Image (cartoon, rainbow, N blue to C red):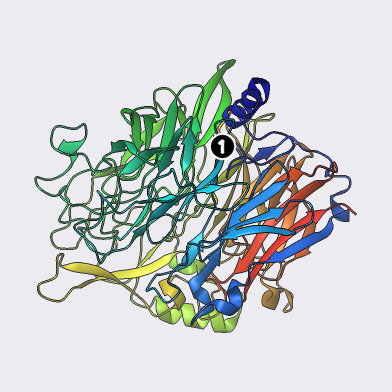
Amino acid sequence: MPRLILACWLLAAGSGASAQQWLHYGGDAGAQRYSRLKQIHRGNVTRLRVAWTYRTGELEAAPGSPYRLAFEATPLVVDGAMYFTTPFNRLVALDAETGRERWIFDPEMDREAPVNLFLHRGAAFWTDGKRRRLFYGTLRGRLYAIDADTGRPDPAFGTEGSVDLRQGVADRFPGKGYGMTSPPAIYRNLVICGSLTADGEPQGPAGDVRAFDARSGKEVWRFHVVPRPGEYGHDTWAPGSWKDRAAANAWSILTVDADRGLVFLPLTSPATDFYGGDRKGANLFGDAVVALDARTGKRVWHFQTVHHNIWDYDLPAAPVLVDVTRNDKKVAAVAQVTKTGFVFLLDRLTGKPLFEVAERPVPQSEVPGEEAWPTQPFPVKPPPFARQSMRRDELTSVTPESRAFCAKLVEDAVFGSLYTPVGLKPTVLFPGTNGGANWGGASFDPTTQTLYVNSMDVGMLYRMVERPAGSQIPYRTQGLGTPNSRFWDQQMLPCQQPPWGHLTAIDLSRGDFRWRSVLGVVDALLERGIPPTGTSNIGGSLVTAGGLVFIGATNDARFRAFDKETGKELWVARLPASAHASPMTYKGKSGKQYVAIAAGGGNKYNAIVSDTLVVFSLP
């Protein structure tokens, strides 16, 4: 490839998605999910129609319950080709304008495997100017390098095109799960990988973040997410509790500042999620945003968002790289949205909060052996974008049946505030284990310095119960008899008064809300004359120069466009199933702009499932 063309590739990879393409999972390497395309805009969005659809064929092949499939992928578009992954971890290449299938790579997953969900969110694109590769990991722990033109594994990478990710992190735990569900990050010729690890017991595969050479597959560096003796943060663990500690992994999306040579990790809670009596201490680097030198894997800075996590409040989403104005100066920053409903805005070079973060006392645990951390960080700005508590008199009244069911559920319950530890009695807490925000994260408009984040208000209702004698730890959580143990009724209607879901626009320079819109509807309630309530939602948004915010996510099988300035819903389309994924947009070689969304449904939220990728354009 001529040097000029290679230079253009590198510029696109380093500074964001080109106007024509979608080169990264989050649009650009910093996950802004912003597009400069404006062919589709406020004035014509109501004319959007389905241009084409593609079905993966996996729905018919799914064994057992359809809840086991989650079509969460966001496609890439590179040089007229669209690439995306399926729940069974196949990699698909299509013609981006017609949907015509070009090739499929199938890693041949065991479809009867005992996994919680078959899911995958996407692949990463890399080129050195000659070779063009797609990198992605699988649920069974293999990292593949696939030729973008042919769909064949690169024989020079690892062993015949793949690397066994379990080696070096899961050797001592052959029976425990380890894999990847999110795309790796690319920095120059490095493929930087997080992981999905088993966290049901305290010990298990390590959640270490690793970088591999894009050409050979050789491991280049490793960052210990649980610090070893002599490493920074080791003293935040009770003696011996660090050893073989599971989780604290980066199962979500990593982001890269190519100009500064930094990679940003959203790390999660150490195992186990709700009991930490065997890991007393603040537990770095659990639930921390960590900035590493992308070349070496050395820590540059960290900011811990939850100390000694005993609520499953993982950092679920990509740290978004943004530029904001502070004291009339442009500041490079990182915006981290959380399950707790907070946004932490951090200086990109130092990790110092750009708005004050107060360490406030929080309730302590009544569970024997547990030592909850005495304080937690509360950002003064922006305000929380999700519900963080509930009173008993706020029980739902949307239907008499729902109110009666929920009232019975909480007869003996304790209503806690944010960071109340789950106790020995049933405990109602907000947000629930899925947030707040989840892996869909946020989108950012650099022209207005506005962050758009969708959230849900679905609480958790748990209590701690003793485990059998001889267990590794003495307590575990017990759900209280609702679908998937969340604080909702048998129809999955939340037990508190609506609204239950929002889309919020946040001015990151001022730390204030620009607007807030209810997100989603429940058809059965609309039929009873009840106004839109919002719904649970999983997936993210997309903001465009056309003045639009596109989002699926909601549990109502709809895809929407909002006015990015006012929050007014401008357009809505019905889908085959709920779109628990994040949309993307691109311009075809014909000059037409397209918007794509995966509509998979299921995902423990509803029984309607699909395997359809839906692509829209103007007629």
Q: Is residue 619 left or right of residue 3?
A: right
Q: Is residue 11 left or right of residue 558?
A: left
Q: Is residue 248 above or below residue 393?
A: above
Q: Name the residue located 71 percent from the left edge and 41 percent from the top edge.
A: 79
Q: Is residue 360 left or right of residue 356?
A: left
Q: Is residue 609 above or below residue 90?
A: below
Percent coordinates x, y for residue 64 in the rendering: 48, 82
Where does label 1 land, which residue? Answer: 131
Residue 462 versus residue 601: which sits nearer the camera?
A: 601
- Image quarter of the N terminus: top right
Q: Residues within 10 Å of mark 1 (few under 14, many from 20)?
A: few
**In the figure, residue 398 lies in which quadrant?**
bottom right
Which residue type does callout 1 highlight? Arg
Can residue 343 be seen in the rendering of this structure?
no
Can residue 20 be seen in the rendering of this structure?
yes
Percent coordinates x, y for residue 348 in the rendering: 46, 26
Percent coordinates x, y for residue 545 in the rendering: 76, 36
- Image quarter of the C terminus: bottom right
In what element is the residue under mark 1?
Answer: loop
Percent coordinates x, y for residue 337 in the rendering: 49, 44
**In the figure, residue 293 lies in which quadrant?**
top left
Q: Is residue 261 left or right of residue 504?
A: left
Residue 137 versus residue 482: which sits nearer the camera?
A: 137
**In the figure, residue 20 lies in which quadrant?**
top right
- Report the label total: 1
Q: Name the residue located 21 percent from the left edge and 59 percent from the top edge.
A: 202
* Furthest residue in direction top, as rendered: 328
Residue 592 versus residue 580: which sits nearer the camera?
A: 592
Residue 575 versus residue 435: which sits nearer the camera?
A: 575
